[in-house]
Image: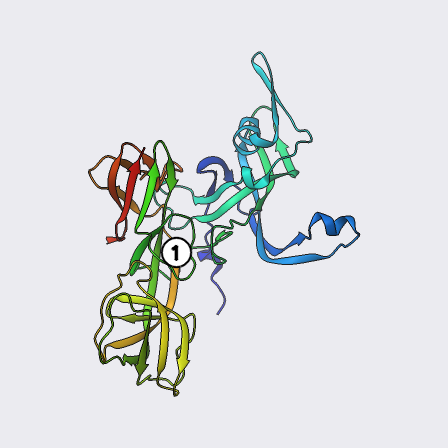
Amino acid sequence: MAQDATQIQFTEYNFKYNFEDVGFLRMGVTAAELGFRYVQVNDAAQTTGIIAISKNGVAPTLRVEMLQTQYETIFGNIAGDQVYPIVDGAKIAYGIGDRKVSLFELAKPGILHPVGVDDDDYANDIYFHLVVPDLSSVSYGGNRDNAQTVTMNFFVLRDSTKSADFNYGIFGDWTATTNAAPNSVFITTESRARAPYKHTTALTLSSKAKCQVYAHGFYRTDSTVTAALNEVGNIVATDQSFDFDTLSTASNFAVGDYIKLGTEVMYIEGITYATSTTGTLTVVRGIGGSTAAGHNDDATITKLSNVYVIPVTRRATWASSAGDDVTVGDSNASENKGLLTWVADGSDTITATVSAVASPNLTVTTTT
C-alpha cells in the first residue's frame, strides 16, 4: 500500500556538538552516510612499498547543512581546535594552516536533537559518540557577517572503549524495540556494553580525582526454551558450572546465550552436551545488574531472547548517598552526567535509575 504523502512529516533537528547547540539543520541535505572504513597498514609496511589495507568494518560519516551559523560558531565552537584565531582590536579572523592534530584527542559527541524538545528528553536523539569536523570539505554560503549556510562533513570515530554494537553511535529511535523500562540497570566504570555485562560493585577515587561512570539498560524477554537444574546438592552463588536436563528444544543452548534462574541472569561461556537434552553449562553469574544467588535442584532454567544492552547514562537519574564524600553529575545540560568527583575521604554509594528501575549500588571509596 502506498504511503499517503499528506501524512509525511519531517523532524527538524538542532545540531549539538559536545552537547552545545551549534546550528539548525537543513534536513533535505543532512545525512549520515554509512560505508566501510579502511585502515592503512603500519608505517614500516608502507615504506617498503606494501599498499595493502585492511577493512575495519562499517563506519558512518555525518554530513550536516547548518543554517544561521556564524564564524564564531564554526571556528570557535566547532573547529576551534584546528584553527588559529587572529585578533586585532575588536576584529577577529581565523587562520586555517597546516597543523598536526590528533583526531582522537579532539573528538567530541555529536547529537541531532529534535527542535522544540526539552534538552533533558533525548529519547529521539540521533547520537554519535565521537565526531571531528572535516575542514577539507566545507561548503559555505550566505553573508560574511550575518547568517550563513554551512555544509560540513564530520568524521565519526570509533570509540575503542565501547563494544562493537555501540562504538560509533546510535541511529534512529532505539526505543522502538525497548519502549518499556529496562529489566535491570547496571553501572560500569568505562563506556562498555559487551558481554558479560557485569555491574561494577566498587571503585576507589583518589584525592581531587574525577571518574566517569556509565549506566546501561539491560532489556530481555523470556523465550519458550527451558530446562531444569540437575544438581541434587543445589548450587550456591559462587558456582560457575552446573548440570541441566529436560531441555525443551534439543541442543538449543549455545555459547553466548543468556539464561535466567529465578531473577538471576547468566551468560553461557561453555557447554558440554551429554545428550541432546542434558549437559553441563559454564556460566558468568549475576549479569546485567542481577544478583548471583543460590538455586535449588530442578529450578527452571529459561533461555532469554531479544537481549539488548542500551547506553542510558544521560537518561538515568544519578544519586549518591548522603556521605558527601563524592558527588555524581545529574544534569543533562552538560557533559557531567555520571561524572564522579572527589569531595572528601570516606565512602558513598552511587545508583542510576531509569523509569523507576534502579541499579545495584556502586560503592565509591574516596581517599587522599
Q: Is residue 202 above or below residue 295?
A: above
- Pick whichever, 99 or 272, lies toward us: 272
**Which quadrant of the figure has residue 74?**
top right
Instruction: Answer few, some or many: residues within 10 Å of disc 1's Cα (few below 14, many 20 plus, some between 14 and 19).
Output: many
Residue 238: percent from the left, percent from the top? 28, 65
Classify residue 6 as left or right of residue 248.
Answer: right
Decide if residue 310 is on the left or right side of residue 365. right
For image coordinates 66% across by 31% down, the residue present is 99
Q: Which residue lies furthest to the bottom in this view?
A: 275
Residue 211 position, x and y percent, is 38, 40
**Residue at image coords 54%, 43%:** 131
In the rendered image of this protein, does residue 122 appear above or below residue 77? below
Q: Which residue is drawn at 27% across and 80% down?
A: 228
Q: Where the C terminus falls, by quadrant?
A: top left
Q: Position of residue 59 (x, y in %)?
A: 57, 54
Q: Which of the colour schemes (rainbow, by chain, secondary structure, one colour) is used?
A: rainbow
The three-letter code of the residue at mark 1 reads Ile
> Secondary structure under badge 1?
strand
Lateral position of residue 118 relative to residue 346, left or right: right
Q: Mark 1 points at which residue?
A: 310
Q: Can residue 300 be seen in this view?
A: yes
Check the image and name the residue furthest to the right: 49
Instruction: Give the x, y percent position of residue 210.
Output: 37, 36
Q: Residue 337: which quarter of the image? A: top left
Q: Which of 284 and 327 is in front in this view?
A: 284
Please tell me which residue lies in front, 24 or 184: 184
Q: Can residue 226 be seen in this view?
A: no
- Give whichever of 23, 11 is nearer the camera: 23
